[in-house]
Image: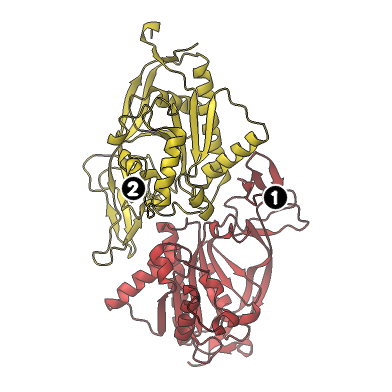
Chain colours: A yellow, B red
Amino acid sequence: MSVMNVVSLPTLSRVALCGGTHGNELSGIYLVRERLRRREKGAEAEPFALVTVMSNPRAVQQCRRYTETDLNRCFTEATLSTPVSDGTPYEILRARELNALLGPKGSPEAVDLVCDLHNTTANMGLCFISYSDCDWICLHIYRHLQARSINNALLLFRPVDDLKNNRSPPAAMEVGPQSHAVVRSNVYMAMKEGVQLMLDWIRLFNSGAQFEGGPVELYTKVKTIDYPRDSESHHISAAIHPELQDRDFCLLHPGDPVFLTFSGETLRYRGKEPLYPFFVNEGAYYEKGIALSLARRRRLSIPSIQSERR
Amino acid sequence: MSVMNVVSLPTLSRVALCGGTHGNELSGIYLVRERLRRREKGAEAEPFALVTVMSNPRAVQQCRRYTETDLNRCFTEATLSTPVSDGTPYEILRARELNALLGPKGSPEAVDLVCDLHNTTANMGLCFISYSDCDWICLHIYRHLQARSINNALLLFRPVDDLKNNRSPPAAMEVGPQSHAVVRSNVYMAMKEGVQLMLDWIRLFNSGAQFEGGPVELYTKVKTIDYPRDSESHHISAAIHPELQDRDFCLLHPGDPVFLTFSGETLRYRGKEPLYPFFVNEGAYYEKGIALSLARRRRLSIPSIQSERR
């Protein structure tokens, strides 16, 4: 690829690393605590402005996903602009504080990149989540992680409407399998390594290094499947089948087992198109009516990039 | 062993199977729901009185371990006899209801056997828990499970003082690893098989079958170890070491790794005696200050038994 094709992008002068957006996803919480502790001791010196944030300290303190409402669903323009009253949930107040700290959203003062740290009970390895297929920064960071042969995948969620005015919607690192309210060393270390590689990449990028373009494989969400449920009680009547459990990102073919009912019956995938399952049996999604999500894999070609300032 | 050595014991005419004592341990909850559903349909006919109970329905509904206080710690004589007031926690009220339903504790009307179904995030397989080393019924049920080659262990907790007047303190089945608020098919099926084998054994016992005695290996709890903690914040500063994680009931030797601190340092077992770890990284025990428990393995010889009525 010739120099002509290198895309110039602004340096990432201000980056946010957030843990504890969900208060029972412990790897990100302990990683943020450890970084704050080291910085307090003067051990951490960043060559760019890194804002390290515990997103939902009240939920963290209670070791629950959230106290009143899911913080991760509070960053819409509508929620952020609703007038505050006595009954406004804690998470909405906290979302406004975070928006003031890291934004305001869509403004030129907003941080250049937000990386939100999450854990899942699903066997997804280290999964980097982006919300745009033309966010070259995120896609190059993912390539950098993959080149270091971390067990990982890139997941692309469809662009969310209310994010369209934002220069950089948040990227997320989702690492599992880890029970909620539990920290496992291997998952903590995978996240720590992923964060370190991302920060290394940002340093290199800011210092003027050029990153070669090329192909990137990613997964785009197509749909979700709920658990079978009892028509009266609405309780689930089956669990993920043992042949699908822990097989995130392994192709699911029509006719493959998906559920095993509590009375012992196997239920099969009725779709016509083979798709890639992910977030298989994620604990927090029972209440959302999601047993697994399904994705299409596709290949994207990304351009070479370099920062504007050298 | 001659007939002279056969211990005669009363039949088990009334047995209780309890799930949902902790409201986020889903295998036992779905197993109890499935049994209740089948019984409603007339599909389940027991040759003895089996009382199937959802122990803590309010915590189950909220998918939390408990709503105000741990139900499993509410069955002491002291708690059961405390006068009720407006501020009495739900779980204490529920413990009294359960005591009336299955007891009263220590009375001749009490059920002959209670089996309480639990899940753990620890890799304990199917672990049968008894509170006495001379409860021949529990020890024979365990032998029956083990002969059917279920991946299991027998754990003996020291007899609890306030249980001493009870004819049969509850036995428990603890099955893992399973995240809290998640159900995994393999764990559900292991529990279902364990319960079925136990009920089969009870039927055989009640019908007059004689069960040969012999050796039984069991684990007796010696002590617990807490996570290393920050002296000021009291937050944990390390997770279970990857070499210990998931290795419940594998002998831990002096000098073996136990923790990996969040800054990357390995901490080793300082005890002088090799012991067997269990409940390694159980999510619900962070708040109790328990990172793992340690047990001694010993061998017991149990007598042949037969029911009094034939």
- Name the quarter where the N terminus of chain B is drawn: bottom right
Marks 2 & 1 on one chain: no
**Residue at disc 2, secondary structure:** strand
Q: Is A207 in front, or is B193?
A: A207
Q: Which residue is mark 2?
A: A292
> What x and y, as percent, mark residue A160?
30, 36
What chain is tagged by disc 1? B
| Residue at image coords 48%, 87% | B208
Q: Quadrant of residue A31?
A: top right
Q: Three-letter amino acid code at disc 2?
A: Leu
Q: Is residue A115 visible?
A: no
In depth, the one of A111 and B101 nearer the eye is A111
Residue underneath mark 1: B231
* Res A214 quadrant in image: top left
Occupied quadrant, residue B306: bottom right
Instruction: Please provide percent x and percent y for residue B78.
Output: 60, 81
Q: Residue at x 32, y 54 (%)?
A: A259
- In the picture as drawn, the residue positioned furthest to the left comes out as A272
Q: Nearer the viewer, residue B143 or B232?
A: B232
Q: CA distance from mark 2 to mark 1?
A: 41 Å
Q: Would you say B10 lies left or right of A222 here?
A: right
